[in-house]
Amino acid sequence: MSSSHAKQPVRTLVTGASGFTGRYLVDNLLGRGHTVIETFAGRDEPETPTRLRLDITSPENCRRVIETARPDYIVHLAAISFVGHDDPLDFYRVNVIGTLNLLEACAATGHTPRKVLIASSANVYGNVTSDAIDESFPLTPVNHYAASKAAMETMVHTWFDRLPILIARPFNYTGRGQAPNFLVPKIVEHFARREPSIQLGNIDVARDFSDVRYVASAYEALLDSEAASETVNVCTGTPYTLREILSAASDLTGHELQVHINPAFVRQTDVKVLAGSPAKLRSLVPEVHAIPFMDTLRWMLAA
């Protein structure tokens, strides 16, 4: 190639770019010199060369975005992810059909990216009693969010021979900027405001909490990896109960919080211990290191 041809920057399309995870991933990719094309769902803002309007439930709209962007990489984060979301059908419209629309748009426009990274969820494993769930565990979802992600994964498998796809199954993760209807931000907010008390559900459920910065780094590294037609857990392998988190936040802030168990917050289908095995992730991207959860908590409380 002659020196007069400047090397084209890598183009990466990120759906759900303005969401919690998307913001961190986009910063990472921009820092590495990618041209990031973000999609947004709202009607109010104008499109730009790097901000495209995308209604994931519209096949035509998906085709237009893929045709316009012709991305080297696609990271598909757009989803309805709050388990308590009102309309069950939305989970399937967005999480299953929306993902299918995106893959079909690649086929329809004759565009094959170098890698398509699709975010699923460890919720697909359901109520498994194990402190080291690996990717071979059966999928036994217990709510619409998890069922939609499991259905999405099953559908995506049928595309493995057509597109270089990687499915990421993140376990719970948290960090600055996560909505306060999620548990750790809710706890952090109560300590930061030095509230006298907090209402929670079962505080003895244990979760493998990752740092959002670790998750974003893992996604970024997986894009670069050779892996395709694979499913990989994104987790640390270390579960913490909410009781332990409350105690740690109390130690870090010197504030005592009275905990009231609200029966309305206790879900019958709550998974007791959900912790993953990060062995496969470590074998694929050994350069990505987990951030200890206490450091995450300290970082969130310092905000």
Image: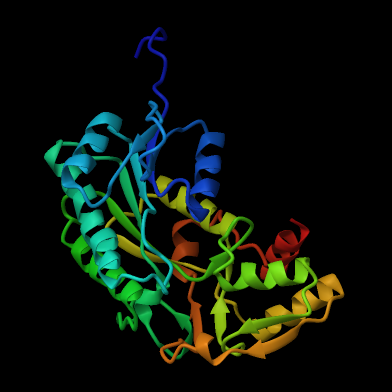
Residue that lies at the very extreme toward the top in this rendered image: 4
Residue 28 vertical placement versus 6 (above, below):
below
Quadrant location of the C terminus? bottom right
Quadrant of the rendered structure where residue 39 is? top left
Residue 217 placement, left or right of 57: right
The residue closer to the viewer here, 208 or 249, is 249
The residue closer to the viewer here, 259 or 226, is 259
Residue 48 vertical placement versus 224 (above, below):
above
Quadrant of the rendered structure where residue 62 is? top left
The residue sitting at 56% across, 56% down in the picture is 288
| Residue 183 x, y percent position in the rendering | 58, 73
The residue sitting at 30% across, 42% down in the picture is 54
The residue sitting at 31% across, 61% down in the picture is 230
The residue closer to the viewer here, 301 or 257, is 257
Residue 279 vertical placement versus 223 (above, below):
below
| Residue 169 x, y percent position in the rendering | 40, 66
| Residue 139 x, y percent position in the rendering | 30, 80
Residue 118 placement, left or right of 155: right
Residue 158 placement, left or right of 1: left
The residue sitting at 20% across, 55% down in the picture is 100
Residue that lies at the very extreme toward the left in this rendered image: 108
Residue that lies at the very extreme toward the front in this rendered image: 44
